[in-house]
Amino acid sequence: MSTMSAAELKKIAKVKKNRTAGDWLIIVLLAIGGVVMLFPFIVLCLNAFKTAADYNANGPLSWPTSFTLDGFIKFWTRVNFPEKVWNSIWTSGVVAICAVALSVFNSFALGIGRVKGRRWIILLIMLANMLPQEALLYPLYIMFKGIGLYNNPWSIVIIFTVIQSAFGTYLLSSVYGTFPKAILEAATIDGASRWKILKDIVFPISKPTLAVMLVFFFIWTWNDYMIPMAFLIDNSSQTVPIAIASLSGDRLMDVTTTASASLISIVPTLIFFLLFQRTLSNGITTGAVK
């Protein structure tokens, strides 16, 4: 058995070494594609550590003549960056958790509960996902102005929870629709209630998918600009994308400070992604296998 295993490993290693010209072409194309995708980030890093005079003299693609942190310091103090980061973390975290929870309840009712007209409900949810945000601004503005939540962070939480949960419901309801009926029937015969079935059977099995949704909902909410810009007027409640946009005026733009702001604003989402990278990859792999 050990001889066969060694032979198999040697054969696999030989196959890996004997790459064809087509394999090398694919590797080269992938490398070029990776460089193209990283090019904006490279330009961002080059300009984030430049002075304004260095940028004006040598352009955006030159190497900095001297590294400086003036852009980071100027952005940090001008917009009170820690406050904006906390606003974004709080909003994105609450939205991600609430949207995932709402998606689970909605999908359980549509995919497993088999409510009447479930296909029409799912179709309406899918059509709602196709609506552009611009079409929602004025009705939402009138509604939240009327209930006194305009210029309140909770208005953003409510709006994004509904938007994200609509996508989550559409995704999860199709997954729950293929859930084995034999397991549900056995649990019902054993006296399990609907809540117990959801909590002890459906939820544990769908944890990988929910983890992927949680990461996506957090990042999508963090990066959104239009709705927070329209609903958050006070400087103390604004998020990171709005703080970056405030650096650009009608006639003047501080390129190096904007590059520094964009680079430092990536750090929190990058940390969040790295913390949940294993969960994200496991969730995608498990979903693919199932």
Image (tube, rainbow, N blue to C red):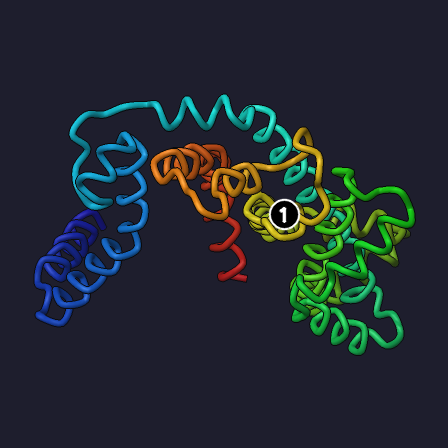
Compared to residue 169, the image places residue 90 above or below, namely above
At 14% from the left edge and 54% from the top edge, which residue is drawn?
13
Type of amino acid under label 1: Lys
Where does the image place residue 204, in percent across and percent down from the top left? 67, 46
Where does the image place residue 44, in percent across and percent down from the top left? 32, 42
Element assignment for label 1: helix
At 86% from the left edge and 48% from the top edge, which residue is drawn?
145
Mark 1 — residue? 207
- Looking at the image, which is closer to me, 146 or 156? 146
Where does the image place residue 259, in percent across and percent down from the top left? 37, 38
Q: How many discs appear?
A: 1
Compared to residue 206, the image places residue 75 above or below, namely above
The C terminus - image quarter = bottom right
Q: Is residue 192 toward the left or the right of residue 94 in the image?
A: right
- Looking at the image, which is closer to me, 70 or 104? 70
Q: Is residue 101 toward the left or the right of residue 145 in the image?
A: left
